[in-house]
Image (tube, grey):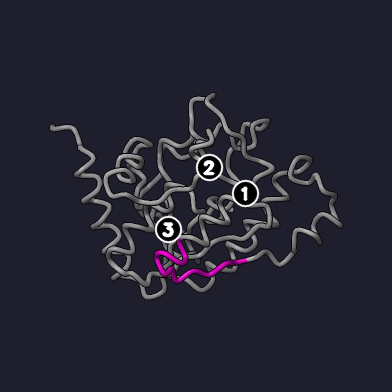
Amino acid sequence: MEEETFKSRLTETEEILSWALTEFERVAVACSFGKDSVTVLSLARELDPDVMVFWIKTGYAFEETEQFKDRLVKEWNLNLTEVSPETTREEMEEKHGKDLFREDPKLCCQCLKVEPTRRVLKDLDAWITGLRRDETEHRKDLYIVEEFEDMPVKVNAIAKWTNEDVWNYIKEYNIPYNPLYDKGFVSLGCEPCTRACTWGRFERAGRWPDRDDKECGMHLIEKA
């Protein structure tokens, strides 16, 4: 059997996105403004320039990410919804201290990422992500389409892509990307919990570098 090529993966992704955007009335792209979700967003916009996009505004984003997000909103005329947690950064720090992200990162992510994501999903039939199987050990068995009870359908449109695939797509189609990648970052999250790195087997090694668990919980909601 002929080995699958990037071109065939790209075609498959376009077909998946076409299906999702046609099949579901209320569908949105989850975008962190990292390279993977921007790649998915770029592909989705080819099919629907006004596709819904949501971004979880934790209050701890890198300044470069904020600026890049603002740039894409303007250049791509994005239909973007910024979703803030019910508990603000200031309120959370007053209640739990300024080092919650270090002392209890799970609780920090629960407050700043999981809770607002749950609110967004209540109003959707499906959501599209930029998750990939080769990012972490946890994601290696990721399905392209995931269905859970009482949850919107989750479409991991580039699940089968590699890191190289993503960068090849960005370069070939001249897609803008977050400038943090040029500063040595490999995977992007909140500023206090993300390091530029070249170590580790997986891309997310620089996320919570002192923890084995590299998931914030946002993409584990369906199983909680």
Is 169 a magenta residue?
no
Magenta residues span: 72-83
Residue at x 68% of width, y 57% of height: 59
Q: Quadrant of the N terminus?
A: top left
Q: Tag 3: residue type? A: Lys
- Relative depth, front residue between 92 and 23: 92
Residue at x 65% of width, y 65% of height: 84
- Tell me which label, 2 or 1, sits earlier in the chain: 1
Residue at x 43% of width, y 52% of height: 37
Q: Are marks 1 and 3 in contact (CB under 8 Å)?
A: no
Residue at x 51% of width, y 54% of height: 32
Q: Are marks 2 and 1 in contact (CB under 8 Å)?
A: yes
- Tell me which label, 1 or 3, sits earlier in the chain: 1
How far apart, in angstroms, are the residues tagged by discs 3 and 2?
Answer: 28 Å
Residue 217 lies left or right of residue 50; in this view the side is right
Asked if 221 appears above or below 81 in the picture, the reply is: above
Is 81 a magenta residue?
yes
| Residue carrying label 1 | 62
Q: Are marks 3 and 2 in contact (CB under 8 Å)?
A: no
Q: Quadrant of residue 122?
A: bottom right
| Residue carrying label 2 | 180
